[in-house]
Image: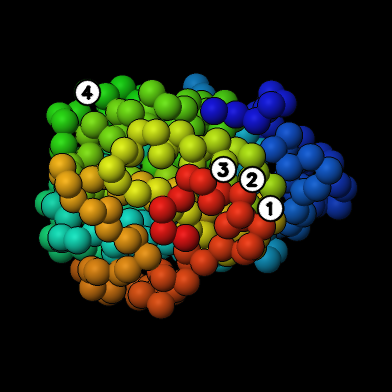
């Protein structure tokens, strides 16, 4: 699952060196000819894990910034708009309160933080391939990494695909795939064998939500992903929602929301409807009030501009 042109992982050094006078510019073959620039106060960490280039720096405008393979993954200032929506859209649309959740990727802990808000969850598993990412997040991004402290969380540093394939059929009520772009180690998370495994591991009536790129930059990738998901989630539904986030390319990023059929003859349910209560603060874990997600925003996030609605019409159920 990739665009026609081969994508090549970048490095933080490339971005830090492209503009003088202390600026980082995000460069990638995923968005040729453009790149957001952020003024750097101090580089806090720069190194390589077994899988990718990792960098953390303090910025003038966005607080602490995390880069993987030279691409912005999170900043103090705007991470909540992504983490909240990636988590609360799928959980919020469930027809029954969730008990078991799985996160693939998400090593910064932000999705775990948001899942911790749900008291009905009994089990929260995370499968993150790169052990350096949680360690870096705990050191430099404590407000995201607080999710790791929830006693319901079990951390597995492993291949997310194999973990999903090894799960018992019908285990999870919700599976959230917090992947980076389909370059390097994350490329396989956009391919059919992985989605077959997700469908199998999901309980009837459960939901998968996966990072699904930008409408402005990656519409062909989104079209292919939606078409593939429709083939996998037969009898269920496929929808696309999005959030706004200034430090991601084009300022917008989407989510593919895949609902598994509740059983033979069951009608697909509409993920645009928020059925679970709005999550609240969790003082016991120093988790504050929501800053982006609400039931109103939940429903609005599925409203697509005309060009995107037209391009994806053949694959989406509720749009």
Which comes sooner in the sequence, label 4 or label 2? 4
- Residue 158: quadrant of the picture: top left
Q: Is residue 29 above or below residue 247?
A: above
Do residues under tags 2 and 3 come within 8 Å of each other at their CB atoms?
yes
Foreground tag (4 vs 3): 3
Residue carrying label 3: 222
Residue carrying label 1: 216
Disc 3 element: helix
State the CA–CA distance, disc 4 to disc 2. Answer: 32 Å
Disc 1 element: loop
Residue carrying label 2: 219
State the CA–CA distance, disc 3 to disc 1. Answer: 10 Å
Q: Is residue 104 above or below residue 121?
A: above
Which residue occupies the foreground of this view, 150 or 276? Answer: 276
State the CA–CA distance, disc 4 to disc 1. Answer: 36 Å
- Residue 48: quadrant of the picture: top right
Foreground tag (4 vs 1): 1
For the point 80% across and 47% down, the residue is 34
Q: Is residue 144 above or below residue 164?
A: below
- Decide: few, some or many residues near mark 2? Use Cα within 10 Å; few <14, some 14-19, many ≥20: some
State the CA–CA distance, disc 2 to disc 3. Answer: 5 Å
Residue carrying label 4: 166
Which residue occupies the foreground of this view, 305 or 10? Answer: 305
Do residues under tags 2 and 1 come within 8 Å of each other at their CB atoms?
yes
Q: Residue furthest front?
A: 265
Which comes sooner in the sequence, label 4 or label 1? 4
């Amino acid at each position: 699952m990739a665009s026609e042109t081969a994508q090549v992982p970048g490095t933080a050094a490339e971005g830090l060196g492209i503009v003088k006078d202390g600026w980082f510019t995000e460069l990638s073959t995923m968005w040729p000819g453009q790149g957001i620039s952020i003024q750097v106060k101090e580089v806090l960490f720069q190194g390589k894990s077994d899988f990718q280039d990792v960098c953390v720096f303090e910025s003038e405008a966005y607080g602490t910034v995390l880069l993987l393979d030279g691409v912005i993954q999170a900043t103090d200032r705007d991470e909540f708009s992504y983490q909240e929506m990636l988590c609360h859209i799928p959980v919020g649309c469930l027809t029954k309160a969730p008990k078991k959740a799985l996160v693939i990727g998400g090593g910064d802990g932000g999705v775990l933080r948001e899942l911790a808000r749900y008291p009905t969850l009994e089990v929260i598993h995370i499968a993150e391939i790169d052990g350096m990412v949680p360690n870096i997040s705990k050191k430099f991004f404590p407000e995201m990494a607080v999710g790791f402290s929830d006693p319901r969380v079990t951390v597995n540093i492993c291949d997310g695909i194999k973990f999903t394939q090894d799960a018992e059929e019908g285990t999870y009520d919700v599976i959230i795939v917090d992947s980076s772009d389909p370059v390097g180690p994350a490329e396989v998370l956009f391919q059919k064998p992985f989605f077959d495994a997700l469908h199998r591991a999901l309980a009837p009536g459960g939901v998968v939500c996966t990072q699904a790129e930008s409408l402005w930059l990656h519409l062909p990738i989104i079209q292919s992903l939606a078409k593939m998901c429709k083939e996998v989630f037969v009898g269920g539904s496929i929808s696309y929602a999005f959030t706004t986030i200034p430090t991601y390319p084009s300022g917008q990023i989407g989510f593919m929301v895949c609902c598994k059929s509740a059983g033979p003859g069951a009608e697909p349910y509409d993920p645009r409807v928020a059925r679970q209560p709005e999550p609240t603060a969790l003082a016991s874990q120093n988790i504050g009030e929501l800053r982006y997600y609400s039931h109103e925003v939940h429903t609005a996030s599925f409203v697509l501009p005309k060009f995107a609605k037209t391009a994806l019409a053949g694959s989406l159920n509720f749009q």
